[in-house]
Image (cartoon, grey):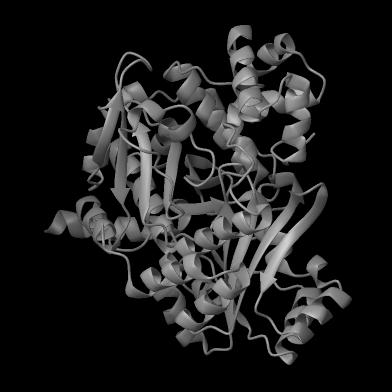
């Protein structure tokens, strides 16, 4: 395996040392010579409050305008990004008049037209997007992306882990359930018992029971129904 | 050599028609619903019917829990996105994976979690459909094409490592595609044969090696960019993840090959993970 690039090593160290996610983003922006860097985590449970977590180096003026115009509903990075898994260049979007107008407005507020976004997923199924944008010429941007895309994938995940720690004031409280454990719990949330679940999933009752038990233990719950509720709170499952 | 020259000409002529590799991510599931349905049917025929795996089958489709978590699919189809020749599923190791949940015992040490390492699973081909469409293409070479497209796709997106679980006979398939698999562990108790865990470097060198062994001159997979699409439209399309939007009636076209058996044992290859 090739050794880690100098920029990446520096970026990871800086992210670890930075006191907040915001400051980490500023450092990454400087290291890779881009204009703006953003981290956006979809709704998360923070002490009973459902809220997304967004940190960005965009200017306060553009952020204010973004909220005022409710651009989150138009911005293809948000609208499509959480339905993507692989990194994407903003040039991959199909342009509608609405999206074009949004990008135009962004340009007029100092946001360059070029951007690259990295979707992030973790063991507990959270979805986040890490984006970099810049004013550039097409060939220069191509070179920047080609040369750094692998670095950015690593950095996106480091930022994500830092964000989880920052949100929860410490370690990640959400346990990593396996896909099967999540599947069984989601059927419990829909009112099925282990017999039904075994039938639905085509597994033995014994196996269904063990998935439910291991899921319940990971969630630290006394009963399977409270485990289902907790899993829903953590957004590990939904119905 | 006269022979290889002739083969190259035929190959270039055929490329635009049938050597198309499409990447399907969750935001495209609806658009390519027909291809996805065909791939779940193909998986049922291969993994359930032929290989006898313990997999969930409903209404003739093989789907598991990971298909509900927004997996990415690389599909091999014709240029109209009607006929499915093959499919493989990709998932990031930072999320839930078969390696972590099912095949943990094949990992010798700690978990393999990295945003630049992705897991490949459920790779299969419709050998009969391919034989009908391309009689001179051997199944072995066809697997090589699918693998090459997979590695090109991974490389184009900045992925550095691919990981997969497979049974030992699969090594031959990898080798014949020009791939070097590094086995990092294996375990018994999954079936008749042990299951191995292998990692593959994704790099320029890997692609070069595969192209040399498979005798492929040009990329099979192309990442879509609107700026490039106009230029591409003027040339013969070789493989891109942009296909004209299908009319609604085409979305649910089902594969004629559903009638035929797709048995891997016929080609002497085995388990594909």
Looking at the image, can residue B210 be seen?
A: yes
Q: Is residue B203 above or below residue A233?
A: below
User: Which residue is at a point 72% across and 61% down the rendered structure image?
Assistant: A53
Q: Position of residue A86 (x, y in %)?
A: 54, 57
Q: Position of residue A127 (x, y in %)?
A: 64, 52
Q: Out of A161 and A125, give the one closest to the viewer.
A: A161
User: Which residue is at a point 41% across and 19% down the rendered structure image?
Assistant: B51
Quarter of the image holding residue A83?
Answer: bottom right
Q: Is residue A200 above or below residue A104?
A: above
Q: Position of residue A217 (x, y in %)?
A: 62, 24
Q: Out of A81 and B25, give the one closest to the viewer.
A: A81
Q: How many marks?
A: 0
Q: Out of B212 and B126, give the one closest to the viewer.
A: B212
- Residue sitting farthest toward the left: B1
Q: Is residue B157 left or right of residue A213?
A: left
User: Which residue is at a point 49% across and 85% down the rendered structure image?
Assistant: A33
Q: Position of residue B21 (x, y in %)?
A: 47, 53
Looking at the image, can residue B62 be seen?
A: no
Q: Out of B153 and A161, give the one closest to the viewer.
A: A161
Q: Is residue A82 left or right of residue B117?
A: right
Q: Is residue B202 above or below residue A215?
A: below
User: Which residue is at a point 60% across and 68% down the rendered structure image?
Assistant: A20
- Looking at the rendering, in which quadrant would you find the N terminus of chain A? bottom left
- Looking at the rendering, in which quadrant would you find the C terminus of chain A? top right
């Amino acid at each position: 395996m090739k050794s880690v690039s100098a920029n990446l090593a520096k970026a990871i160290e800086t992210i670890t040392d930075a006191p907040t996610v915001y400051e980490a983003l500023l450092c990454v922006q400087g290291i890779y010579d881009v204009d703006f860097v953003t981290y956006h985590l979809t709704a998360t449970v923070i002490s009973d409050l459902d809220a997304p977590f967004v940190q960005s180096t965009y200017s306060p003026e553009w952020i204010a305008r973004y909220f005022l115009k409710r651009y989150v509903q138009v911005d293809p990075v948000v609208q499509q990004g959480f339905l993507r898994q692989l990194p994407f260049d903003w040039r991959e979007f199909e342009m509608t008049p609405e999206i074009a107008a949004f990008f135009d407005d962004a340009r007029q507020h100092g946001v360059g037209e070029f951007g690259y976004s990295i979707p992030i997923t973790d063991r507990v199924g959270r979805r986040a997007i890490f984006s970099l944008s810049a004013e550039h010429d097409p060939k220069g941007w191509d070179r920047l992306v080609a040369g750094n895309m692998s670095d950015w994938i690593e950095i996106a995940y480091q930022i994500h882990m830092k964000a989880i720690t920052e949100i929860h004031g410490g370690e990640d409280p959400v346990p990593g359930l396996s896909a099967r454990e999540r599947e069984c719990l989601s059927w419990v949330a829909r009112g099925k018992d282990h017999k039904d679940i075994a039938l639905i999933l085509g597994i033995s009752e014994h196996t269904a029971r063990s998935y439910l038990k291991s899921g319940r233990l990971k969630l630290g719950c006394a009963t399977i129904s409270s485990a289902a509720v907790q899993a829903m709170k953590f957004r590990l499952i939904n119905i | 050599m006269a022979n290889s020259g002739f083969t190259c000409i035929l190959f270039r002529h055929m490329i635009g028609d049938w050597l198309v590799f499409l990447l399907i991510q969750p935001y495209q599931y609806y658009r390519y619903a027909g291809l996805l349905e065909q791939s779940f049917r193909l998986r049922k025929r291969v993994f359930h019917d032929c290989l006898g795996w313990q997999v969930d089958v409903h209404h003739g489709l093989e789907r598991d829990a990971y298909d509900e978590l927004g997996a990415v699919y690389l599909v091999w189809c014709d240029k109209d996105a009607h006929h499915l020749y093959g499919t493989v599923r990709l998932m990031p190791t930072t999320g839930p994976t078969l390696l972590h949940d099912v095949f943990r015992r094949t990992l010798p040490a700690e978990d393999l979690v990295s945003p630049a390492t992705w897991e490949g699973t459920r790779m299969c081909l419709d050998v009969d459909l391919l034989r009908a469409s391309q009689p001179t293409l051997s199944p072995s070479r066809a697997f090589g094409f699918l693998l090459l497209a997979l590695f090109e796709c991974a490389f184009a997106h900045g992925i550095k490592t691919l990981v997969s679980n497979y049974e030992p006979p699969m090594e031959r398939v990898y080798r014949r595609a020009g791939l070097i698999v590094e086995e990092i562990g294996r375990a018994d108790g999954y079936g008749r044969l042990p299951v191995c865990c292998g990692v593959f470097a994704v790099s320029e060198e890997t692609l070069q090696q595969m192209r040399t062994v498979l005798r492929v001159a040009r990329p099979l997979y192309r990442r879509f960019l609107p700026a490039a699409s106009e230029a591409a439209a003027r040339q013969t399309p070789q493989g891109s993840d942009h296909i004209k939007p299908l009319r609604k009636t085409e979305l649910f076209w089902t594969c004629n090959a559903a009638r035929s058996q797709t048995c891997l044992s016929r080609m002497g290859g085995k388990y594909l993970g």
